[in-house]
Image: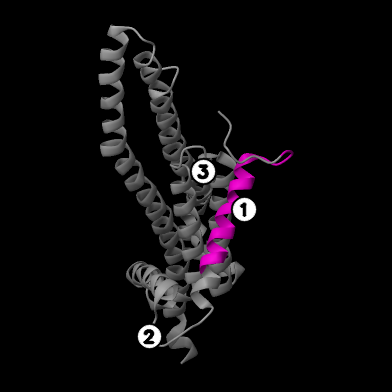
Amino acid sequence: HPPILHLPQVWDHVLYTWIVMLVLIGVAIAATRKLSLVPRGAQNFVEVVLEQFIQLIDDVIGPQGRAYLPLIATLGLFILLGNLLGLVPGMNGPTTNLNTTAACAVVVFFAYHYIGIRKQGLGHYLKHFMGPVPALAPLMIPIELISHLARPLSLTLRLFGNMFGGHVLLAIIFFLMGLDGLIGWALSGSAIGAVVGGIGGVVMVVFTVGFLYPLKILVSFLQAFVFVMLTMLYIAGAIEHAEHHGGEHAPAHH
């Protein structure tokens, strides 16, 4: 069935992307409206969340990676909220649409290349595609190009596949439990329907609430974490090349 909130001439994944954006903007405004040295309420919550992102960045990229906190945290929070929104009955999670996940992956793709070029210049950045020695360039350039082009594809399909698959599974469960399924059979008036449909409906409700929903919540957090972690690894790779290049030429500058 279509989502409960639908605007004509607007794709559902775009509408629910706007909703996620409005929620994040609202939380940001609430957290920064009355800043204090002793955080409370929304400010305390947001600071705790950002501290977790900073700790991840320090572990994966290093302290120099804190400059990219806005990019990494925004992607992580947007993807997480988009994943969780798809678990609300009648809602449409934007990350269950291939266009949304592809857009996030393309942002990461261009961002880490831009960071690498900015750190070491276009010429030196392109040199790492050629391998450690010039003789290997004909072999390494195609391998590196395929590797880098596969990254946005991998980010796109991993997030989309996991979230869309879970969305379809929940839809099937709700369909089986609905008035056209077990609950409808239990209310049909027949004794067999009342017994089988009633027991089956209870089992499906317990299975959904006790196992399926907690599992999907865990997957939502896990997929957001994986996307953020890979983003940090790609940025760390671009910075690592820059630092290695700088280290090689440090004595000459001295």
Residue 125's image quarter?
bottom right
Instruction: Determine whether, in the image, residue 183 is placed left or right of residue 15.
Output: left
- Which is more N-terminal, label 3 or label 1? 1
Residue lying at the far front of the rendered structure: 189
51 or 248, which is in the foreground?
51
Whole-percent x and y of residue 66? 44, 75
Q: Residue 154: x and y, percent?
A: 47, 44
Which residue is more in the foreground, 38 or 145? 38
Provide residue 218's location: percent of width, then percent of height.
32, 47
Q: Residue at position x 41%, y 35% from top? A: 166
Q: Residue at x 48, y 72 (%)?
A: 242
Q: Which residue is mark 1?
A: 18
Pair 3/2: label in front: 2
| N-term mark: 1 or 2 | 1
Q: Quadrant of the N terminus?
A: top right
- Colour scheme of the picture: one colour
| Amino acid type of the residue that numbered disc 2 sits on in the rendered structure | Val
Tell me the magenta residue range.
8-27
Disc 1 residue crowd, few under 14, some 14–19, many 20+, Cα 10 Å: few
Q: Considering only vertical position in the picture, is 25 above or below 197?
A: below
Name the residue tied to disc 2: 38
**Residue 23 image-quadrant placement:** bottom right
Please give the name of the residue rendered at 55% of the width and 65% of the height, measured from the top-left corner: 26
In magenta segment, residue 21: yes
**Kind of element beneath mark 1:** helix
Say whether disc 3 or disc 2 marks the residue closer to the N-terminus. Answer: 2
Instruction: Give the residue at mark 3.
Output: 93
> What amino acid type is highlighted by mark number 3?
Gly
Disc 3 residue crowd, few under 14, some 14–19, many 20+, Cα 10 Å: many
